[in-house]
Amino acid sequence: MMGIRDKFKRIQILLTVFQTVLVALGAALSAAAKVDVARVSNPLIQQAVIFLQQSSWWQAPLCILAVPIVQFIKTYFGSPHVWDCVHFILDEFRKAAYPQEDQAAPAAHRVTLFQHRTCCWLFSACWLYRRWPWDGWLVPAERSGQLTRKSRIRFPATDDAKTAGVAGETWAKNYCIYIENLPNLKPGSTEATIQNFAKRTWCKPEWIKRQLKQEKSFARSFCGMPIEVRGKEWGVLLFDSTSTTMVGREQIKTLVQGKAAVLAKLLEKT
Amino acid sequence: MKWLELNQIPLNEWRQEELNGVLVQVSVSPYDVPIAVRGYPDSDPGWFVIEFKYATEEELRPAEGAPHIVLLLGKNSGRIYKIRINRKALAVEKVGLELKVEKLQQEVSRAIDQALQTGATNRLSNTYDLTKKVILNNRKDLFQEFGFPRT
C-alpha cells in the first residue's frame, strides 16, 4: 500500500490535470450542443464545434464516467500532503521511542501505522492465516523513514478477535502491548528459537521461516498502540526495533496522547 | 471551572499480563487516559458535573444506571466523558465536609461499577478503574463547587 501510494504521488498531479480536462470537455460539449454552426464566422471554432457536436455521443458518457473514477482513485490513496504529515509525525515518534539509538539506521528502528481494512486482496496472506480476504485485516498505511516501504505484511484482525502478530493482538485487546528481549533470529536459527519467537509474537512459524529464507532481519522488541479516530479503533501503531528494549516507551505514550487529536484529524481525511 | 491537569504516567503504568499464553507488558491505551478533569455546577440547576478531557472527542450517550448519577459515555469508545450528579436527590448527611466528599466519591464509584456491569469488557474495566482513581485522587478539588448543605 505504501509503495503503491509512493508511486501514486508521482502521477497525482497528472490525474488532477486529466480530471480538469474532462470537466472542461464536459462544459465545452454542453456549450457546443446549443451553438448554431452556420452563425460561427471563425473557421477554426466552427470546426471545433462540429467535432464536439458529432462526437458528443461518446465524449459525454466518457466525461460522466471518468470524472468520478479519477476522483475515486484520488480519494482511495488520500491526499499526498496528508500522508506527508502523518509520515512526519511517525518520524517524531521514532525519535522519541529510540532516542539513544542510531537515527541514521531507519530500518533498524521503525514505526509503522497499520490501518484496519475490511478487505485484503493479498492472497498469500489469506492462505497463510487461512482467512477470507473480506475477514478484516491490518494493512501497513505508513512507515517512518524512507526504507522498507514496500511491505507485504498483513495481519488478520477479524470481528471474532482471531488475530495474529503484535499488531493484531493490540487491535483485539485495545491495549498498549510491549515485548522485549526477543531471540535473535537469523538464517540457521534453531527450530526451538523460531518456535519461541513465533509464540511470543503470535506469528506463524512458517511465515518466520519464509522471511528468514529471504534473509530479512527480525525485530527484538515490539510495542503496539491502538489508534483511534472519533472514539473508533482506526488501526495500530507498531514500534519495532532490532534493539532488545525500547528506551522511550514511557515517553511515547505521552507523545502519542499529545499528537492524537492532530493524527485523528489527518486520518479522518484518508 | 478550571481544568485540573493530570499527570498521566503514574496513572498509566506498564504491568505484566498474560495474553493468549504469553507474558507481556501491557498498559491502557493513551486514548483512554484522561488528560484533565474538572467539576462544576451544571447550567441545569440542581445538577453538578464532573467532566473528563481525553486526547480525542466523540459523540456522547447516557449510560443506564442510577437516576441521580448519570454517566455520559463516548458513543464508540464507552469512555466516561461526563458524570452528572443530582445534588438534591443525593442525600448527603449532615456530617463534616470531608465525609461528605468521601460519600459522594463513593456514590460516583458505585455508579461507575454499575455502568460497567452492563457493558463489561476487560478494557473498559481498566479504563473505568482509571476514572475512579482520578476522582479519588482529586475529590477535594472536584467537589469544591458542589454546594453542600450547611451542617
Image: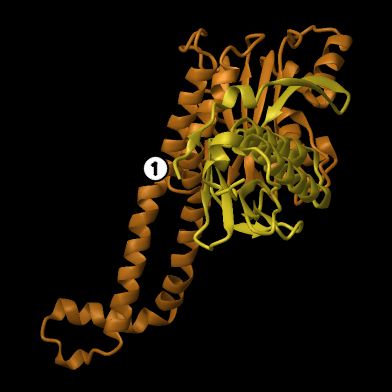
Chain colours: A orange, B yellow
Along the line of sight, the residue nearer the viewer: A23 or A170: A170
Tell me the residue that label 1 is attached to.
A81
Residue at image point 74% right, 12% down: A182
User: Where is residue A147 shown, x and y percent of the image?
Assistant: 51, 23
Report whether A13 appears left or right of B39: left
Q: Position of residue B61 (x, y in %)?
A: 65, 59
**Most distant residue in the left direction:** A41
| Residue A60, above or below B146 | below
Residue type at mark 1 is His
Chain of residue at mark 1:
A
Task: Tally the marks.
Answer: 1
Quadrant in which residue B9 is drawn: top right
Q: Is residue A269 left or right of residue B118?
A: left
| A191 relative position to B77: left or right | right
Residue under the image location 50 percent in, 25 percent down: A93
Does residue B130 lie above or below B81 as drawn?
above
Using a 10 Å C-alpha cutoff, classify the residue at mark 1 as few (fewer than 14 neighbours), some (14 to 19) or many (20 or more): few
Residue drawn at x 86%, y 16% as measured from the top left: A195
Residue A158, image quadrant: top right
- Give the farthest residue toward the front: B151
- Residue B33 seen in this snapshot: no
Residue A10 appears in view: yes
- Give the x, y percent position of residue A12: 40, 48
- Residue found 82% across the figure and 35% down from its top: A128
Quadrant in the picture for residue A25: bottom left
Q: Which residue is more in the foreground, B4 or A203?
A: B4
